[in-house]
Image (tube, rainbow, N blue to C red):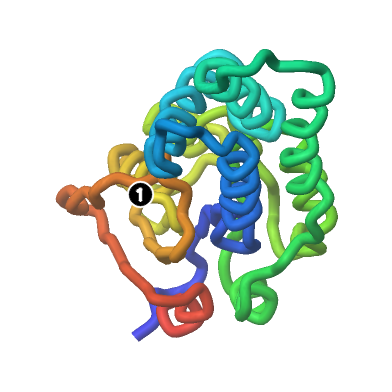
């Protein structure tokens, strides 16, 4: 039985509405092959890159600029050869390849949003660099389905609490929909919202986290596909 209309659905963008991390994974694979480290395995190189990315995110936030800084920093830490301008340009090319990717809408998303938007209040909520995220939203052609768009620096419980206040949301009928336990599900539950977890096979490693149990008064739905929202809302 679907939840009665209208509910408010806060909906994540990257890897929920469109593909995103697969392009970063390809860039990481190209970078690892390019580095071709003689002592570290590809898995060890990736672990080092993850550590450096965490540092860069703390200093520079999310987005391609932070990602390319992490690649350059990782190269300088692991490579025995100096970082020449030519090598730096090659590394920057891995990030440019991501930026040049067309928006690939996940199957079922377009029809699902078209079904939900007349029935419920939809707010697009994504984190990252404002210019980058705005560009992806515009190119996706999906913004027409949403009442408003929120691009935030981080998705944590205080941010969800601020969004509740900003949009005068009623937590009892508000849900966060997304693929990331760390950014979409757990902090939303912590702010007293309901949540809908839609797993993605290629969710970024830095977004992995154990799903929290829904606290009293909150509900957590786990769906296999985005289009199953139509069966619940």
Query: Residue at position x 82%, y 45% from top?
Result: 135
The answer to whether 169 is drawn above or below residue 81 in the figure is below
Of the pair 224 and 201, the residue shown nearer to us: 201
Asked if residue 86 lies left or right of residue 58, the reply is right
- Percent from the top left, x then y, of residue 134? 78, 42
Of the pair 141 and 69, the residue shown nearer to us: 69
Residue topped by disc 1: 181
- Percent from the top left, x then y, of residue 177? 46, 58
Of the pair 172 and 56, the residue shown nearer to us: 56
Of the pair 39 and 144, the residue shown nearer to us: 39
Asked if residue 153 lies left or right of residue 169, the reply is right
Asked if residue 122 lies left or right of residue 95, the reply is left
Asked where in the image residue 102 lies, by quadrant, the reply is: bottom right
Query: Residue at position x 44%, y 84% from top?
Result: 231
Label count reads 1
Farthest residue, direction front: 38
The answer to whether 86 is drawn above or below residue 16 in the figure is above
Indicate the secondary structure of the residue bearing disc 1: helix
Asked if residue 94 lies left or right of residue 24, the reply is right
Query: Residue at position x 21%, y 48% from top?
Result: 212
Location of the N terminus by quadrant is bottom left
How many residues crowd around disc 1 within 10 Å: few (fewer than 14), some, or many (20 or more)?
many
Asked where in the image residue 198 lies, by quadrant, the reply is: bottom left
- Percent from the top left, x then y, of residue 75? 59, 24
């Amino acid at each position: 039985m679907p939840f009665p209309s209208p509910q408010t659905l806060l909906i994540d963008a990257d890897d929920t509405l469109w593909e995103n991390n697969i392009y970063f994974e390809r860039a990481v694979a190209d970078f690892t092959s390019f580095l071709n480290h003689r002592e570290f395995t590809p898995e060890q190189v990736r672990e080092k890159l993850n550590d450096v990315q965490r540092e860069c995110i703390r200093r520079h936030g999310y987005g391609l600029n932070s990602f390319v800084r992490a690649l350059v920093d990782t190269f300088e830490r692991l490579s025995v050869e100096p970082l020449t301008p030519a090598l730096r340009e090659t590394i920057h090319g891995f990030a440019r390849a991501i930026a040049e990717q067309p928006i690939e809408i996940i199957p079922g998303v377009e029809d699902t949003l078209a079904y939900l938007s007349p029935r419920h209040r939809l707010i697009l909520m994504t984190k990252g660099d404002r210019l980058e995220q705005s560009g992806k939203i515009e190119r996706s052609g999906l913004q027409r389905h949403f009442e408003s768009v929120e691009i935030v620096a981080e998705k944590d419980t205080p941010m969800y609490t601020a969004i509740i206040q900003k949009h005068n949301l009623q937590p009892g009928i508000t849900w966060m929909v997304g693929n990331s336990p760390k950014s979409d599900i757990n902090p939303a539950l912590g702010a007293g919202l309901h949540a809908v977890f839609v797993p993605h096979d290629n969710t970024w490693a830095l977004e992995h986290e154990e799903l929290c149990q829904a606290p009293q008064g909150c509900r957590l739905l786990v769906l296999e596909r985005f289009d199953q929202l139509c069966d619940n809302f």
